[in-house]
Image (cartoon, rainbow, N blue to C red):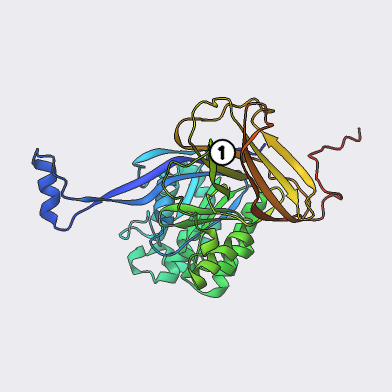
Amino acid sequence: MKKRMIDIGNVSKVYRLYEKPIDRLKELLLREKKQYGKEFYALRQVNLRICQGETVGIIGKNGAGKSTLLKLITEVLSPTEGSVEVHGRISALLELGAGFNPEYTGMENIYLQGAMLGMKQKEIAQKVPSIAAFADIGDFIHQPVKSYSSGMFARLAFAAAVHTEPEILIVDEALSVGDTKFQIKCMDHMKKMMSAGTTVLFVSHDINAVRRFCERAVWIHAGEVRMDGQVNRVCDAYLDFLKCGEDPARIKKKIPAFIKKEGIAEIVDFCVEDESGIVEDEVFYDMPLKITVTYDVYEEDFKDAVLGVALRSKDDDYTCGLNTLLDQVKIPWKYGRNQVKLHFPYGIRAAGGEYYFEAALEDQTATVGFHYIQRVKRMHVIMEYESEGIYNIPHVWETG
């Protein structure tokens, strides 16, 4: 199992916004309960786990929360809620020349950067020749960095960041400055670092660069993780969003309010989502999924009621049937609105093709139906050629 390098749990970053500067002072000094400002969530309930050797692209529109996330990881900011755990030395290019003192020379800033990363002076001195050679700015390395062009700044900042042997490298659009030749040089060096096991977080608006460079992508939208997964799949969804806006089929339906009806109970919603909360109609066979079944109870007498969920093929073959009686799970059964979630952490593992879910509420013996919905949700499963038949059974070969 790969080592966890970054573990972000339920992280939110909240700022208070005020219409006038005096309102901030009023709220601070006056003891009255009136609130003069309003809360703005730069990030809301973000969960993210990044392991050793992963190359993760962070994508999203301007103002989505990408830079805020990186600043939390590098401890430039502290979270309002939640926790951020980082295991390993971080080198970050969050902004061009961030961490550089403009009054210092390039050489002095190299030593400053190394010291900030906890390196000893002797260690830094050993790295100086390779940093200077990579930056290739000549005698300007002995001049104050305030005299540098943006391209020279980028060269020195990147060279210093990657030659201090970080375990985690974070790059936030810094490579957009500078000539194409140097950008290629940077990409080639980062690929070598990846091969050596360095974890890389790469933030860019260049989706093609993210596709070429990363194996995984995280789409941040309005402060939330909108999608997290295989890079091409996430990038395709993001580009579709930019072109067409929100796909109505992927928006969670608003469930009507509870209304007392005849009968014992009724299923009012059946939702299939991926880990990021995106409503899915097309999934990879091994993609983790979550089914949320919402149902209304009109008669509370049937406390040991059973919920069943089944999967059938397009030809109506009974692929899989699950219920809470067999799994010995007691479902909520109170008058009004109730909800149960069913998780498939390893995906539904079915062969590629079209399938349909069905759902039922039944009595305690699972023989008398209260409410049954056939073909409640269509699902298209994508499966790479990894096995044959209708099901890919998790397995391990042993040859010794």
Task: Residue at 54%, 68% (x, y): give it.
Answer: 239
From the viewer's side, name the closer residue of 94 and 396.
Answer: 396
Q: Residue furthest front?
A: 262
From the viewer's side, name the closer residue of 56 and 255.
Answer: 255
Instruction: Determine whether, in the image, residue 20 is placed left or right of residue 142.
Output: left
Residue 165 showing in the rendered view = no
Instruction: Determine whether, in the image, residue 397 is placed left or right of residue 87.
Output: right
Task: Residue at 53%, 38% (x, y): give it.
Answer: 263
Residue 68, placed above or below residue 153? above
Callout 1: helix, strand or loop? strand
Residue 80, position in %: x, y? Answer: 33, 41
Query: Given the image, on which type of amino acid does mark 1 rest?
Result: Lys
Question: How many callouts does the rendering have?
Answer: 1
Task: State the residue position of label 1.
Answer: 341
From the viewer's side, name the closer residue of 356 and 6.
Answer: 356
Q: Quadrant of the N terminus?
A: top right
Specify few, some or many for label 1: CA neighbours under 10 Å numbering under 14, 14-19, or 20 or more.
few
Residue 268 showing in the rendered view = yes
Residue 237, position in %: x, y? Answer: 57, 63
Task: Residue at 39%, 52% (x, y): give it.
Answer: 68
Residue 120, position in %: x, y? Answer: 47, 41
Residue 125, position in %: x, y? Answer: 49, 49
Instruction: Determine whether, in the image, residue 315 is placed left or right of residue 167.
Output: right
Instruction: Determine whether, in the image, residue 334 is placed left or right of residue 133.
Output: left
Q: Quadrant of residue 293?
A: top right
